[in-house]
Image (cartoon, grey):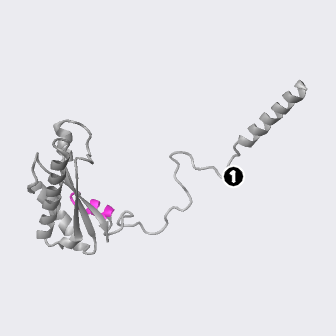
């Protein structure tokens, strides 16, 4: 009886092991770093580098940036911010069907309520500047995240400076 039990246990183990084994795939993937040989483009090269004109990627590539930085407890548009927002306005005038959202952010210092209000003032300052440059306000929405979405996680002046910002995000077009 013990021999029968041992035989059954071994047979069960063999069946379980065989069921778990992987079969070799018929076609292996290319080795790391190997360039694919099939499907390589043979026609003309896309002058946009694969970026669709009027897309979020085109916005980031064609403007001076999507982020405007602010000083401590500030929401005024300085010369650097004007340059960035001017390039955004030019792009938005080219693609007048695109809508954007401007996100206002603050550093971690201050209360949640204060930082939400400050983020809102920063986003609206950027919106008002773009509107003054001819972008229809109906194409621009604003939202404040306050200190809830930091881009830099440190608790030092360099991190705080990166978190005091307004970010323009292409929503649709």
x then y, percent, for residue 72: 11, 45
x then y, percent, for residue 124: 15, 61
The quarter of the image holding the C terminus is bottom left
Q: What residue is shown at x 54% (from left), y 62% (from top)?
A: 39
Residue 24 vertical position relative to residue 126 in the rendered view, above or below: above
x then y, percent, for residue 119: 18, 53
Tag count: 1
Look at the image and say whether residue 163 sits in the magenta stretch. no
Q: Which residues are magenta?
A: 56-65
Characterize the magenta stretch by its predominant secondary structure.
helix
Where residue 99 sits, quadrant-wise, is: bottom left
Instruction: Judge left or right: residue 15 versus residue 31.
Output: right
Q: Residues within 10 Å of mark 1 (few under 14, many from 20)?
A: few
Instruction: Judge left or right: residue 90 versus residue 26.
Output: left
Residue at the disc numbered 1: 26
Q: What residue is shown at x 26% (from left), y 40% (from top)?
A: 153
The quarter of the image holding the N terminus is top right
For this rendering, which residue is in front, 37 or 126?
A: 126
Where residue 126 sits, quadrant-wise, is: bottom left
Q: What residue is shown at x 24% (from left), y 37% (from top)?
A: 154
For this rendering, which residue is in front, 37 or 172?
A: 172
Residue 36 vertical position relative to residue 31 in the rendered view, above or below: below
x then y, percent, for residue 76: 8, 55
For this rendering, which residue is in front, 29 or 109?
A: 109
């Amino acid at each position: 009886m013990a021999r029968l039990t041992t035989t059954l246990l071994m047979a069960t183990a063999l069946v379980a092991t065989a069921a778990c084994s992987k079969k070799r795939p018929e076609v292996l993937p290319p080795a790391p770093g190997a360039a694919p040989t099939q499907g390589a483009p043979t026609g003309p090269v896309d002058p946009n580098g694969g970026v669709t004109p009027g897309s979020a990627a085109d916005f980031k590539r064609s403007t001076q940036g999507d982020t405007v930085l602010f000083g401590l407890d500030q929401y005024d548009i300085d010369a650097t911010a004007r340059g960035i927002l001017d390039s955004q306005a030019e792009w938005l005038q080219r693609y007048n069907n695109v809508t954007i959202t401007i996100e206002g952010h603050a550093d971690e210092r201050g209360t949640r309520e204060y930082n939400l209000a400050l983020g809102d003032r920063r986003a609206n300052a950027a919106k008002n500047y773009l509107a003054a440059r001819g972008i229809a306000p109906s194409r621009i929405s604003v939202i404040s995240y306050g200190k809830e979405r930091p881009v830099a996680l440190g608790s030092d002046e360099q991190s705080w400076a990166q978190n005091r910002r307004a970010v323009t995000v292409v929503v649709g077009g």
